[in-house]
Amino acid sequence: MIISDQIGDMLTRIRNAGMVRHDTVEMPTSKIKVAVLRILKEEGFIIDYELVKGKPERLIKIKLRYKEDTKSMISGIERVSKPGLRIYTQHNEIPRVYGGVGIAILSTPKGVITGQKARKEGVGGEVLCYVW
């Protein structure tokens, strides 16, 4: 199966798995997906992720995090820049997600980083997604 928007597919799988309270979710791997998952783990939205060797291709297995009342830690996840419409921002125009409660994930010349770190380092880039 050919997926034109790998990041959008990953975010949709995470959103759907969280809505039905699955403990884990699996998907095909890519470097950009691993970079986004590293940020989600650092920010506490997921427990962990691991690369699993599969026969046709490698997979990523993500362990989702839930609050005490079985609500997902990720209450919202939104794809911003899409293959048909790329959204770029300068370092002084990086959006704040829900007044700082959420995070923006950007692809910059210094790698895939959060919006807060991009502001500190003074770099802009492509806005991949918002997570809150």
Image: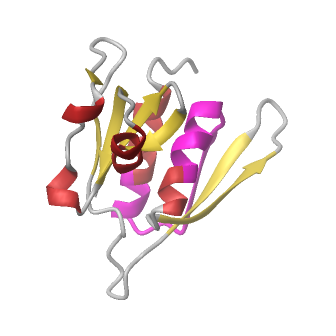
In this rendered view, identify the residue nearer to me: 9 or 103.
Answer: 103
Taking 131 as reference, is 108 above or below it?
above
In this rendered view, identify the residue nearer to me: 27 or 121.
Answer: 121
Q: Position of residue 80 (x, y in %)?
A: 27, 31
> From which residue to which does the magenta span run?
15-38
The image quarter in which residue 118 lies: top left
Taking 6 as reference, is 44 above or below it?
below
Q: Quadrant of the C terminus?
A: bottom left
In this rendered view, identify the residue nearer to me: 95 or 4.
Answer: 95
Taking 86 as reference, is 8 above or below it?
below
Tell me, yes or no, whether the highlighted magenta stretch contains residue 112: no
* Residue sitting at the far top: 84
Q: Position of residue 97 (x, y in %)?
A: 20, 51
Residue sitting at x 45%, y 46%: 13
Q: Position of residue 72 (x, y in %)?
A: 36, 70
Q: Quadrant of the N terminus?
A: top right
Residue sitting at x 27%, y 14%: 85
The image quarter in which residue 119 lies: top left
- In this rendering, would 104 be left or right of 47? left
Residue sitting at x 34%, y 62%: 74
